[in-house]
Amino acid sequence: MTRAESSLPDLATPSAVLLVKRGTCNRARSACNKIRRAGLVACVAFLSGNGLHASTSAAEPNADPAFDAETLEHFQALVRMDTTDPPGREVEAAEYLAKVLREAGINTEIVALEPHRPNVIARIPGNDSRKPLLLMAHTDTVNIDPAKWSFPPFSAARDGGYIYGRGTVDDKDNVVAALMTMLTLKRAGTPLDRDVIFLAESGEEGTTRVGIQYVVENHFDKIDAEYCLAEGGGVTRENGRVTSASIQTMEKSPRAIELIARGPAGHGSVPLEDNAVVHLSAAVARVAAWRTPIRLNETTRTYFERLAAIAPPEQAQNYRDILHPDPAVQARADAWFRTREPRHASVIRTSISPTMINGGYRVNVIPSEAKATLDTRLEPSEDPEAFLEQVRGVVNDPSIEVNWAPRDLRPRGSSSIATEAFALLEAEFERHYGAPTLPTMSTGATDMAYLRARGIQCYGIGPAIDVEDGAKGFGAHSDQERILESELYRFARFHLDAVRALAASAPTP
Ligand SMILES: [Zn+2]
């Protein structure tokens, strides 16, 4: 999926600021104790003072050239495999992963609905004192137009500090980070309090029936876990500097609404009051002008609170205002978002974008039917049927039917930010990147939706990406795709430490 958070607003972030609110200090303290127990560096920043803390150094907590070299080897091998979906050719990547995992002595199996679109599941056992941790990443990518690439899309070419290729930031970065974590834990014989499970699934980019949906419905016992780490978050860099990290805790629920206008057909030379095209156009305009009610939740409230603390004054004021109890103040911030930061205008509500409109077939015929489709993204707690009723009220035209249109439905669910896992991830982002963490709700969708609906607390993470890179056409799903090589390594090291913090047993005294 698109890295929704790569479009985070400009931030003038003092990297020395760590956003640990007073209310989360106990959690942070327990996170620190846990990290200590795992034999890692103590996160001094959490335990000093109160409120805002000075950052620890983000310099290479576990630099290891051999680890980086192996990360590169697997990454290039996987990027060189064409796994574009459609049609989906994940089998080569799945077999590669299974071979590498098995050679390391890790229990691995392949499960598939369609033989050429398999999923890989591997497990390193722990002592069962806690429920497992699942590491998930998808092997398929979106398609490419070869003419648009300056380096061939499956070359994994290294140039100017970047690695180029489809899937470099969506999602082979997560695949390789999870693979390196598995290999490192196994080779080191790290004692684990919980099983660590690896899942490389196919079909995330639009064919989930062969991927996560198939695995959840047929092999759930093999991936059932307390926590899951997957794509969807990341670290924002601006002007080469890290400004903030994001952990995705929830995502909107994609639906489609159809407006169908009906009226008498007729000769175009005789205008009719009941022209279906005219009624439909007016209805689309009314729906587009409608400001759906503002709906905030634990994640989005915390997101804006924390963002306000690190943003320049004008932006910060709007982030505070959107949380204001006075609807007039909120409405002003909402209007500012709509023109300046449209992603934020979507994050605060269930959103509607008219995306397709269809009617008529020749110039001199008034058609009897016209249809519009609205891309609708429900805020997770929205009641779908009540929302559809509201849309009917806004359309307010008896000649127009308002209904759900077919769309792959992802189940709904969200993860809490009040967990030990969230606090541990925050601590690791601080340690590796010197960055404050923002919990985020994606406007788009990921495979985590299926797991959250089964009660697994899922957190989306990812490597550092320059905000400027998306605009240049190098982001996820863009004409080209690339990752900073140094950031691939830093992410893999972060990933390993995060999993150690979540799963490693305390050293025996
Ligand atoms: Zn993805």
Image: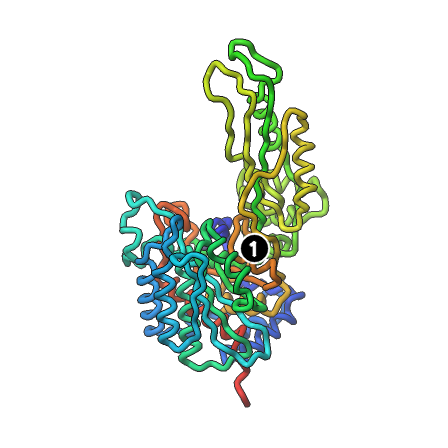
User: Which amino acid type corresponds to the residue marked 1 in the rendered image?
Assistant: Thr
Residue lying farthest bottom?
A: 509
Residue 184 % position (x, y): 41, 75
Give the colour scheme of this rendering. rainbow
**In which quadrant is the C terminus drawn?**
bottom right
Location of residue 149 in the rendering, given as x and y in whole percent from the top left corner:
30, 47
Visible in this render: residue 85? yes
Could you tell whether 262 is left or right of 139 in the image? right
For image coordinates 57% across by 79% down, the residue present is 128
Q: Position of residue 137 (x, y in %)?
A: 45, 61
Q: Report which quarter residue 225 is drawn in.
A: bottom right
Is 367 placed above or below 238 here?
Answer: above
Disc 1 crowd, CA 10 A, few/some/many (<14, 14-19, 20+): many
Q: Farthest residue in the top direction?
A: 269
Q: Is residue 186 above or below residue 414?
A: below
Q: Is residue 113 left or right of residue 132?
A: left
- State the residue at coordinates (27%, 51%): 151
The residue nearer to you, when weighing 102 against 250, is 102
Q: Looking at mark 1, is its residue's CB closer than 8 Å to ligand 1? A: no
Would residue 229 be found to the left or right of residue 149 on screen?
right
> In percent of the image, x 49 and y 70: which residue is there?
197
Compared with 128, 327 (above or below) is: above
Quadrant in the picture for residue 90: bottom left
Q: Is residue 469 visible?
A: no
> Helix, strand or loop at disc 1?
strand
Which residue is under mark 1?
Answer: 440
Observer-nearest residue: 2 or 276?
A: 276
- Quarter holding ligand 1: bottom left
Q: On the image, which quarter does residue 502 sit in?
A: bottom right
Q: Nearer the viewer, residue 314 or 319?
A: 319
